[in-house]
């Protein structure tokens, strides 16, 4: 009898332990998984650099409604959420939340601006996106790669300034005005201006605060150095792209026979995070001031945030820095007229700060993207994903899946989940 009582107490204790463990697991998962639910697990990581903390995650359903918002604190890089089956877009923002007025779940849309709080400036900011499809009762695990969306201005130094000068300032323009939750930039008339501080030698002026984060330039920026009331300007041959560090250094040379002009003796260089290069130039008189030659981007590089697909002389074909699904409805799948009309309506207002002549990628372009999608995606802030994209061939609209074996002639039309990511050909003068 005594043994039976001991065994009974043992099983009761074991059962209580199992209940306790089950309760702890529920707190981690946060929700019970019903028969109609699927489980989404998202892991975040930076591309080559640690992810800034905290990380704010927004999950949007196929109707573009925000269904959940999560914050991952320092030391946490993943979260799990139970959701109904369907297709979701997951966006992650990593950075110092004290700087930004981030939207709540009810306020968030994919195009909500990431607003700065009053008196704040941009800090290190990374954004990532992934499209996830959940089926009933299954778990989908996805890794969200975050890309840095800012540049870092390390320092600004102007040397050999005349001793009687009372003020020196530097302006960089245009730069992007704002950035949206989906990682696209908005507005192309921003500017950064800074007054420099005279150093102890009396002729060197420096930016007092080092390491200022800025949004990238909107095209090729102009750097204007103002000595007293006299401005000197230089238009850069290259854009200042995100994830690059920039140092500006100039040397003033006294004019001799005519007003001073700005002559570039160095180049604008930006390099991947962790290295430093800079802008170097001299001020001075010149009978034949240097005019910098226009630099044509190379195939496989990025330009204006776009991937460079092809270069033919000064004509450059670019893949858009942004993409969009939900352009057509599922019932439009085989209706070429309706699909074409809806796509053209989107293209009319697509990335106007870059080009006004966006079009669907053609067969050759789509085939190149299909075969090279991994290397192309690594270069872009808004990544290509393994889902269907529109392209056109012989006046017929098709779709293809990046990474598939080939382009198939039976893949005509498109559905709600088919992405639009157009191309454009621009002429660089």
Image (spheres, helix red, strand yellow):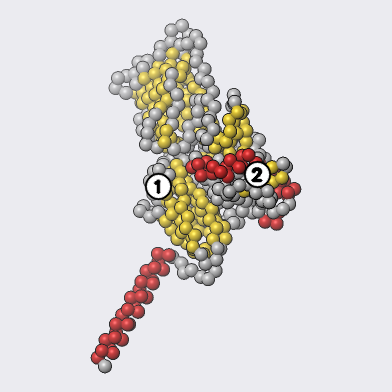
- Residue 135 seen in the figure: yes
The residue sitting at 42% across, 46% down in the picture is 46
Instruction: State whether residue 88 is above or below residue 186.
Output: below
- Residue 180 seen in the figure: no
Q: Position of residue 164 (x, y in %)?
A: 36, 15
Residue 299, numbered circle: none
The residue sitting at 47% across, 25% down in the picture is 223
Q: Report the residue marked by disc 1.
A: 51
The kind of secondary structure element at disc 1 is: loop
The kind of secondary structure element at disc 2 is: strand
Q: Position of residue 345 (x, y in %)?
A: 69, 44
Label 1: few (<14), some (14–19) or many (≥20) C-alpha neighbours in 10 Å: many
Q: Nearer the viewer, residue 297 or 200?
A: 297
Of circles 1 and 2, the one toward us is 2
Q: Nearer the viewer, residue 184 or 119?
A: 184
The residue sitting at 36% across, 17% down in the picture is 160
Q: Nearer the viewer, residue 30 or 158?
A: 30
Q: Report the residue marked by disc 2.
A: 391
**Quadrant in the picture for the C terminus:** top right
Instruction: State whether residue 83 is above or below residue 272.
Output: below
**Quadrant in the picture for the N terminus:** bottom left
Task: Choose top left, top right, bottom left or bottom right for residue 189.
Answer: top right
| Distance CA(mark 1)–CA(mark 2) | 35 Å
- Judged from this view, the residue extending furthest toward the right is 337
The residue sitting at 47% across, 24% down in the picture is 224
Q: Are marks 1 and 2 in contact (CB under 8 Å)?
A: no
Which mark sits nearer the N-terminus, 1 or 2? 1
Instruction: State whether residue 144 is above or below residue 314.
Output: below
Instruction: State whether residue 200 is above or below residue 108.
Output: above
Q: Is residue 29 left or right of residue 301?
A: left
């Amino acid at each position: 009898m005594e043994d039976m009582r001991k065994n009974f107490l043992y099983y009761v204790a074991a059962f209580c332990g199992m209940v306790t463990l089950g309760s702890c697991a529920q707190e981690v998962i946060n929700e019970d998984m019903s028969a109609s639910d699927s489980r989404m697990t998202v892991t975040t990581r930076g591309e080559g650099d640690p992810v800034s903390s905290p990380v704010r995650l927004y999950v949007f359903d196929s109707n573009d409604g925000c269904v959940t918002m999560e914050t991952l604190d320092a030391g946490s890089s993943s979260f799990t959420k139970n959701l109904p089956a369907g297709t979701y877009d997951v966006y992650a923002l990593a950075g110092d939340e004290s700087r930004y007025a981030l939207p709540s779940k009810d306020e968030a849309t994919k195009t909500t601006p990431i607003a700065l709080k009053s008196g704040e400036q941009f800090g290190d900011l990374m954004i990532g996106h992934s499209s996830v499809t959940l089926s009933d009762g299954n778990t989908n695990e996805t890794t969200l790669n975050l890309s840095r969306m800012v540049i870092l201005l390390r320092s600004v130094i102007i040397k050999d300034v005349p001793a009687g000068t009372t003020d020196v300032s530097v302006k960089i323009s245009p730069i992007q005005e704002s950035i949206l939750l989906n990682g696209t930039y908005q507005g192309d008339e921003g500017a950064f201006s800074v007054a420099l501080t005279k150093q102890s030698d009396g002729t060197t002026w420096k930016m007092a605060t080092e390491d200022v984060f800025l949004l990238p330039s909107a095209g090729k920026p102009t750097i204007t150095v103002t000595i007293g009331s006299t401005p000197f300007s230089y238009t850069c041959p290259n854009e200042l792209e995100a994830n690059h560090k920039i140092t500006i250094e100039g040397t003033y040379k006294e004019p001799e026979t005519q007003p001073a002009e700005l002559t570039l003796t160095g180049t604008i260089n930006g390099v991947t995070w962790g290295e430093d290069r800079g802008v170097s130039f001299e001020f001075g008189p010149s009978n034949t001031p240097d005019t910098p030659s226009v630099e044509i981007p190379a195939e496989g590089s990025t330009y204006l945030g776009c991937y460079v697909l092809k270069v033919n002389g000064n004509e450059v074909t670019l893949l858009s820095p942004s993409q969009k699904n939900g352009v057509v409805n599922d019932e439009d799948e085989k209706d070429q007229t309706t699909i074409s009309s809806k796509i053209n309506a989107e293209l009319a207002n697509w990335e106007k700060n870059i080009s006004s002549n966006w079009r669907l990628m053609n067969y050759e372009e789509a085939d190149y993207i299909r075969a090279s999608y991994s290397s192309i995606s690594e270069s872009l802030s808004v990544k290509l994903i393994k889902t269907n994209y529109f392209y056109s061939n012989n006046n017929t609209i098709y779709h293809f899946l990046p990474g598939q074996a080939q382009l198939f002639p039976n893949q005509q039309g498109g559905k709600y989940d088919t992405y639009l990511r157009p191309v454009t050909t621009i002429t660089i003068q």
